[in-house]
């Protein structure tokens, strides 16, 4: 769900075809959960695929249960009681990684030319629209 820029993390939600739905920027040192806090409210999906960083009960899993969304998130290694997830469905998580790889093909995104977050986010939206149309 997130990728680091020079000092910024890009948090993204994508659909099942890796088309971007929404974005959030946070400072590079911020927790991935800040992106989840911003992107999860109002989410309507059958399932959410995310990596171990999102294996948090109160801020992620509880919200997903309340929204009737399946959490396809592997348990953290430090979790005492492991929570099962759909391993076959989790294999599709590479689609979000593919999306980040596509937008990083644009040098302005990969190197973060813009100093202002609003300009950088605008560039991300532009590149995402171009990728969506392709």
Image (cartoon, helix red, strand yellow):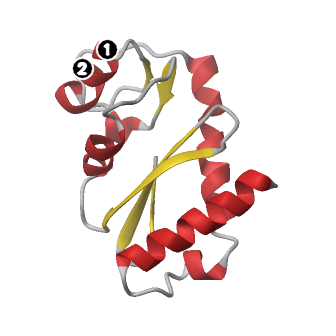
Percent x, y of residue 14: 57, 41
> Regarding mark 2 in the picture, which secondary structure is present there?
helix
Local packing at callout 1 (Cα closer than 10 Å; few below 14, some 14-19, many 20+) is few
From the viewer's perspective, tell me whether residue 79 is left or right of residue 17. left
What residue is drawn where x is 25% and y is 15%? 81
The residue lying at 67 percent from left, 51 percent from top is 98
Q: CA distance from mark 1 to mark 2?
A: 5 Å
Q: Is residue 82 visible?
A: no
Which quadrant of the rendered structure holds the C terminus?
bottom right
Residues at badges 1 and 2 in contact (C-beta under 8 Å)? yes
The residue where tag 2 is placed is 62
**x and y percentages locating residue 101 in the rendered image:** 66, 60
- Residue 104 as seen in the image, left or right of residue 84: right
Corner quadrant of residue 58: top left
In this view, the residue farthest toward the right is 134
The reply to whether residue 80 is visible in this rendering is: yes
Provide the secondary structure element on which disc 1 rests: helix
Vertical position of residue 2 compared to residue 7: above or below = above
Where residue 87 appears, as percent x and y from the top left, is 57, 19
Residue 41 bears which disc, if any? Answer: none
Q: Residue at x 46, y 76 (%)?
A: 120
Disc on res. 65: 1
Which residue shows up at 46% across the image and 69% down it?
121
- Would you place residue 25 above or below residue 118 in this image? above
In this rendered view, identify the residue nearer to me: 82 or 95.
95
Instruction: Decide: few, some or many residues near mark 2? Use Cα within 10 Å; few <14, some 14-19, many ≥20.
Output: some
Is residue 35 rendered to the left or right of residue 70? left
């Amino acid at each position: 769900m997130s990728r680091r820029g020079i000092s910024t993390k890009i948090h993204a939600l994508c659909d099942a075809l890796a088309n971007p739905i929404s974005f959030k920027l946070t400072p590079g040192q911020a927790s991935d959960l800040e992106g989840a806090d911003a992107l999860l409210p109002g989410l309507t999906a059958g399932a959410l695929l995310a990596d171990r960083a999102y294996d948090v009960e109160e801020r992620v899993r509880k919200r997903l249960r309340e929204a009737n969304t399946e959490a396809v998130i592997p348990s953290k290694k430090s979790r005492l009681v492991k929570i099962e997830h759909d391993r076959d469905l989790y294999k599709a998580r590479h689609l979000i990684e593919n999306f980040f790889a596509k937008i990083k093909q644009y040098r302005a995104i990969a190197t973060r030319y813009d100093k202002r977050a609003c300009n950088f986010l605008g560039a991300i939206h532009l590149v995402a629209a171009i990728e969506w149309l392709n």
